[in-house]
Image: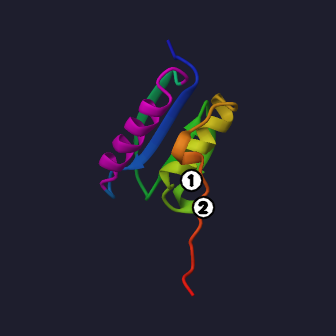
Amino acid sequence: MTRTPRLEIEYCTQCRWLLRAAWTAQELLTTFQKELGEVALVPGTGGVFDIRLDDEVIWSRKESGHPELTELKRLVRDRIAPGRSLGHSDRVHTEVSEP
């Protein structure tokens, strides 16, 4: 039985990205503990680090590099809980230049 929404993190075993995938899963499960039905870690090869939500790729390392966690949380939130605030993750960080 698959619980929805289902988030998959496919990571490269050759690159040893299991810890990165597990940390990402932990952060998403902590943030979306009531909204996510399931998070799966999927071993892969060839430098893959793809994140899928209900079979839709929402992040691909080959296209965009490794995701910043705040950006990834916004992408997930926009699909599963669009009206929800992410607190500090929603704030726009701007650099203040000194004269």
Circle 1: residue type: Ser
Q: Give the structural element (helix, strand or loop) at label 1.
A: strand
Query: Magenta span: helix, strand or loop, mainly?
Result: helix
Res. 51 in view: no
In the rendered structure, are the residues bearing label 2 and label 1 in contact, judged by CB atoms less than 8 Å apart?
yes
* Picture residue at 47% right of the left edge, 54% below the top: 48
Label 2 Cα crowd, 10 Å radius (few <14 / some 14-19 / many 20+): few
Residue 63 is labelled as 2
Res. 38 in view: yes
Q: Does residue 51 appear left or right of residue 18 in this picture?
A: right
Q: Quadrant of residue 27?
A: top left
The residue singled out by tag 1 in the image is: 60
Q: Nearer the viewer, residue 80 or 9?
A: 80
Over which residues does the magenta segment extend?
16-35
Measured as percent of width and height from the top left, residue 59 is found at 58, 49
Pick out the residue farthest to the front.
Answer: 99
Q: Is residue 98 above or below residue 92?
A: below
Q: CA distance from mark 2 to mark 1?
A: 5 Å
* Picture residue at 61% right of the left edge, 35% below the top: 85
Label 1 Cα crowd, 10 Å radius (few <14 / some 14-19 / many 20+): some
User: Any magenta on residue 29?
Assistant: yes
Q: Is residue 77 above or below residue 95?
A: above
